[in-house]
Image: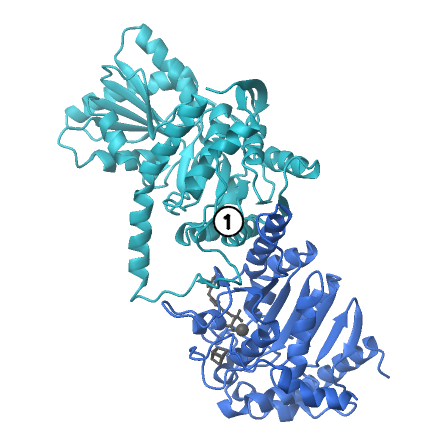
Amino acid sequence: MKKERVVGLEGSFAVAEAVRMANADVIAAYPITPQTHIVERLSEMVADGDLDAEFICVESEHTAMSACVGASAAGGRVFTCTAGQGLELMHEVLYIPSSMRLPVVEVIANRALSAPLTVWCDHSDMMAVRDIGWIQMLAENNQQAFDLTLCAYRIAEDSEVLFPVMVHIDGFYLSHVIEDMNLPEDEEVAGFIPEYEHPFTLDPDKPVSMGCYGPPFIYPETKKAQEVAFENTISKIIETWKAFGDRFGRHYAPVEKYRMEDAKIALLTMGSCSETAMLAIDELRAKGEDVGLIRLRLWRPFPFKELREAVKDVEVLVVLDRCISFGMGGPVCSEVKSALYGLQKRPYVVGFIAGLGGRDILIEGFEYMIRSALEKVKAIERGEEIEMEMIGIRDGEGE
Amino acid sequence: MEKEEELFVPRLVTTEEIFAPGHRACIGCGEALAVRHVCKALGKNVIIVTATGCIEIISSLLPQTSWQVPWIHTLFENSASVMSGIESAYKARVRKGKIPDKGVKFVGFAGDGGTSDIGIQALSGAMERAHDFLYVCYDNEAYMNTGIQRSSSTPYSAWTTTAPVGKKSIGQATWKKNMPEIAVAHRIPYVATACPSYPFDLMDKVKRGAEIEGPAYVHILSPCPTGWRYPPNLTIEIGRLAVETGVFPLYEVIDGEYRLSFDFPELKPVREYMKEQRRFRHLTEDIVEKIQARVEEEYLKLREKAGVK
Ligand SMILES: Cc1ncc(C[n+]2csc(CCOP(=O)(O)OP(=O)(O)O)c2C)c(N)n1
Ligand code: SF4
Ligand SMILES: [Mg+2]
């Protein structure tokens, strides 16, 4: 294991450091809270000559992603970042790099969506881009934001992958919080992220046509090929995380478990609130309860196998969503239920929605969810229907 | 002297078809003809980005392609943005010693819709950021690919499927947006108008635009028999009439200096341009006069800018 420096860095700066160490060629980004510190820091690095890249100060997020597509198609290593409305504005373009197999790397400082206008965190922006065909992973702290951004390049550019990768870091909770973290030496990182050559680039010496028009006689075959290749990336993602762990001593997995030994009740979370959830688990364990925590590190491709394995002995699975799918409930909960539905033996799944628009979820919140879930399971066993619950909502009575 | 040069120009044009035949354009398509000329002028050391629209649809039906040079299409409104990324990546990779500098030219293509409507923000951004690229707008004065819907580049009073002629409508109710002037307002080093009825003028302008450092914009009037409702054998004729009537003057603006490519002290009447086009067949004399007056006024302004008395 190589020596690392311990530094105090904001999550945004940690991401910028990773992009600098990855030696990106082109950055195209448009500022939006809470992502702004990432673009500002990268601008400084380019201005000071610490990063030799073209920084395209684009006029919109639609152009940011379009420019990344162009730069990647021309063989460049690229980076962009956005949040909330910005991710929505680039939505149309997001399907292009995944369909054209361009290894764009993007960091999202997750932000809730208007209206009402908000700049604070939830996962509505992330859930709106579930189906774009990007590899998507989540960080829970600044160290992970840094590590996963580095890994994103190595995964995306692997010749057997060649898909874009999105790293989600919760807005403010990570982007604006300064934490201690370990920074490896530049040379160590350079050794981890090899120079890459895309097999097909826009090059007058070897002309190719990209983005042709696909009528019904060929479109479905292109999509099938894309889906097969995308599902196959899981093994490469795991392999890369293993290589990262071997080199830097920090280990990642598609589904990560915390105090899950003999747990009959499990909480499932994603992103920064997982660290608060761990404290809640510690408190409940101290009271002798059989609870544990499961965190989804990898969101796409969905880690079916790893999730099923993680819950095989669990009786009640409590799923937290930081997003509403209006008229449907929590999107993560729906996906988890569908992932487990085909199993002979599966836990009861009870979903909660919390933490919308930057509302904090406290330790008591997680404890409440777990206790309340057990009540709901009793109701289910009595044959009653249970409803999805949004916790911590003032209902206006008595105010 | 000048005469002689003109005489020899055709021999200098490559016989190689860089935009290969066998594409699926309508018979008599002015846009496909313009693309063919533009590609001959550009040569093979280019990367071309094309917006969604007729050009992309006629040339890239999987698994075939008409493009003999590196070519990319992604979406409708982002040709200039994709171009920005390609140019930047090239610059960075050359600077970092990852690729040799071979003097590649970067060229964006889009229709009038992809340029003056949905893509105007992307183009404005790219021109303002001063990427080194040439942008070519193929103006067939409507959204042809989706079935002749109006754009902001459709001329006043023309029939389209979304500006139909009716009891309360004379067709397009607004005047054509002057996209070349919008490009000029960005103070870019090169802006020109062209038309495939004048192929050598067109090719000269494309070459100049590609060679100049910084953003260049060439706006090509591309007659469309299908959308303008005229017999396909008249494409060259109609383009010529657009120029001779002053409806679409050919000029260049080099570093802010206007230069008329052809000047007509006596313009032909606009009626001559309009009469073969069924998109104008509903026009009454008073509307034609209104258009005539506007064309003359605009032409005078342009002559003044070019310093022609
Ligand atoms: C975002 C988006 N909106 C609408 C369309 C549908 N569309 C495709 S091409 C086109 C019109 C193209 O018009 P123009 O740019 O003038 O090119 P032309 O086909 O006339 O050459 C439209 C409306 C689209 N592809 N994408
Ligand atoms: S509709 Fe017009 S522009 Fe499109 S291919 Fe046909 S003739 Fe050409
Ligand atoms: Mg058009």
Can residue B118 be seen here? The reply is yes
Q: Amino acid at mark 1?
A: Met
> Would you place residue A89 above or below residue A386 in this image?
below
Residue B275, position as x, y percentages in the image: 58, 93
Residue A231, position as x, y percentages in the image: 30, 43
**Residue tagged 1:** A90
In the picture, one chain is blue; tell me its letter: B
| Residue A210 falls left or right of residue B125 | left
The residue drawn where x is 63% and y is 86% is B10
Q: Secondary structure at mark 1?
A: loop
The colour chain A appears in is cyan
Q: In the image as oriented, which residue stretches furthest toward the left?
A: A344
Residue B79, position as x, y percentages in the image: 55, 61
Snapshot colouring: by chain
| Residue A42 falls left or right of residue A334 | right
Residue A156, position as x, y percentages in the image: 43, 42
Pick whichever, B171 or B110, lies toward us: B110
Tell me the quadrant of the picture where the N terminus of chain A can be found: top left
Pick whichever, B91 or A325, lies toward us: B91
